[in-house]
């Protein structure tokens, strides 16, 4: 079925000549059409324009099978692309949240068996069906907030059996969810307790046992490593990325969340699709990212929840870098997949302009998960993943009104979902 959305107050993020990403000053440009229409056909964006363009509209309306949606006073956006999540997990970690309130650091909680190791223990006990069911609830929730594409990582398994279990769950989610989903193998998320003092052996297990099985079942699109203080070293990260590359897995790196780890430099060296977190980013890191194909990706939800420093975004954009933002949805450090909140955090905490924050959560975050040719903007031929807002005054209202859900309707793959 075709869909015609008409009388749109403002159609946001249009592109006549689509780009894969936006850098530096480009990020402050947001192309829109006021009093617009949008035509969706066969799951794709087929055409758009101004309501005064009656000749184009009259041709479209000759088909009596078109579903017409009236959007007077409402805005239409390209769906958010959430390029970094851990939303397949078993159980919440609110007790650790209380430990954080009492003053314990992320590293201190991890040393006590909390953090990632806690989630790994819970996941080990859960069945695939249980994980699929709970993850689908989270996926449906993020759809309601306007997300149309999501990357999901493993990394709460930390054994061959459980890492494969997580990735098989993600594969099932790809098949049953209307969301565009990418899977990332993150066996190097933490070192299991049984390998304490034997980290090299765990790295070898990932390379020699996990990776061949992940590849044989075609379970992952990317490989990730937590290259940071107290986790995996620069050298270990290089070895793991090279092993992943042999199986055609491009890198996505957890980098510089806890310290200056050289994770950004390693990511650029190995042409990582993105380097994520980046709380500790200085002149050397910015210089390294310039002229690379690696997307700097910010996870403001984690920095907010953990009370960590915020990345120097204004400095990064001024230097000419692109920036993406994602939710880092996970049970320990960012228990929310609400990309509207992430959009607001970009403006509130990073001092991004609304235009920059919108581009960071749509076209640039689409690039950070390898789908910006199909998603992230309103362009003819792209997949029709869009959302219609409630009646709101303008696009600046989206980050401004951070406490409410402004989404009224969602269209994914050309079908009305909500």
Image: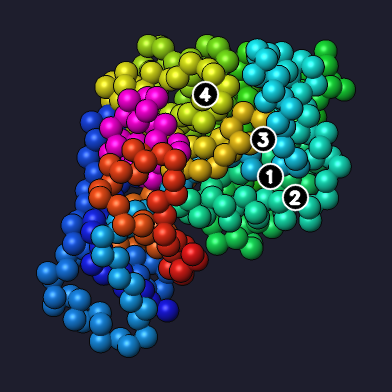
Magenta region: which residues?
341-367
Callout 1: SS: loop
**Cα distance between the residues tagged 4 and 3:** 14 Å
179 displayed left or right of 58: right
Q: Is residue 94 above or below residue 1?
A: above
Callout 2: SS: helix
Residue 88 numbered tag: 1
Nearest to viewer (mark 1 / mark 3)? 3
Among numbered discs 1 and 4, the one appearing first in the sequence: 1
Among numbered discs 1 and 3, the one appearing first in the sequence: 1
**Cα distance between the residues tagged 1 and 4:** 21 Å
**Residue, disc 3:** 331
Q: What residue do we see at 26% from left, 60% from top?
A: 73
Pointers 1 and 2 in contact (CB under 8 A)? Answer: yes
Q: What residue do we see at 26% from left, 69% from top?
A: 6
**Cα distance between the residues tagged 3 and 2:** 14 Å
Residue 300: percent from left, percent from top: 48, 29
Q: What residue do we see at 31% from left, 21% from top?
A: 314
Residue 303 numbered tag: 4
Callout 4: SS: helix
54 or 249, which lies in front?
Answer: 54
302 or 240, which lies in front?
Answer: 302
- Majority secondary structure in the magenta region: helix
Callout 3: SS: loop
Q: What residue do we see at 30% from left, 70% from top?
A: 70
Residue 243 in view, yes or no: no
Residue 90: percent from left, percent from top: 76, 42
**Residue, disc 2:** 131
How crowded is the residue under tag 1: few (<14 C-alpha within 10 Å), some, or many (20+)? Answer: many
Residue 51 in view, yes or no: yes
Pointers 2 and 4 in contact (CB under 8 A)? Answer: no
């Amino acid at each position: 079925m075709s869909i015609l959305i008409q009388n749109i107050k403002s159609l946001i993020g249009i592109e006549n000549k689509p780009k894969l990403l936006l850098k530096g000053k480009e990020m402050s440009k947001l192309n829109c059409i006021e009093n617009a229409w949008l035509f969706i056909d066969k799951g794709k964006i087929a055409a758009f324009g101004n309501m005064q363009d009656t000749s184009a509209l009259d041709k479209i309306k000759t088909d009596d099978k078109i579903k017409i949606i009236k959007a007077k006073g409402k805005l239409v956006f390209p769906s958010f692309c959430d390029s970094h999540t851990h939303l397949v997990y078993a159980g919440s970690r609110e007790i650790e949240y209380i430990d954080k309130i009492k003053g314990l650091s992320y590293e201190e909680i991890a040393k006590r068996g909390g953090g990632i190791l806690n989630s790994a223990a819970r996941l080990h006990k859960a069945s695939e069906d249980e994980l699929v069911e709970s993850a689908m609830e989270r996926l449906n929730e993020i759809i309601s907030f306007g997300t149309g594409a999501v990357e999901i990582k493993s990394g709460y398994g930390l054994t061959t059996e459980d890492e494969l279990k997580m990735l098989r769950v993600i594969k099932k989610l790809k098949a049953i969810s209307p969301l565009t989903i990418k899977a990332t193998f993150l066996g190097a998320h933490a070192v299991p307790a049984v390998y304490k003092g034997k980290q090299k052996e765990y790295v070898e297990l990932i390379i020699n046992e996990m990776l061949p099985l992940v590849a044989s079942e075609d379970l992952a699109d990317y490989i990730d490593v937590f290259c940071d203080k107290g986790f995996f070293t620069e050298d270990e990260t290089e070895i793991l990325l090279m092993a992943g590359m042999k199986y055609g897995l491009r890198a996505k790196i957890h980098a510089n969340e806890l310290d200056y780890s050289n994770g950004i430099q390693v990511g650029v060296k190995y042409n990582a699709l993105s380097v994520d977190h980046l709380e500790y980013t200085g002149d050397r890191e910015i210089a390294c990212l310039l002229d690379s194909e690696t997307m700097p990706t910010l996870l403001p939800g984690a920095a907010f929840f953990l009370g960590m420093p915020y990345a120097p975004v204004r400095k990064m954009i001024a230097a000419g870098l692109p920036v993406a933002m994602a939710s880092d949805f996970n049970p320990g450090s960012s228990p929310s997949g609400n990309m509207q909140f992430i959009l607001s955090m970009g403006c509130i905490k990073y001092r991004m302009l609304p235009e920059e924050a919108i581009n960071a959560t749509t076209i640039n975050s689409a690039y950070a998960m390898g789908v910006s040719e199909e998603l992230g903007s309103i362009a003819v031929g792209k997949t029709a993943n869009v959302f219609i807002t409630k009646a709101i005054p303008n696009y600046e209202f989206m980050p401004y009104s951070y406490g409410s859900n402004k989404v009224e309707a969602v269209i994914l793959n050309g079908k009305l979902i909500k």
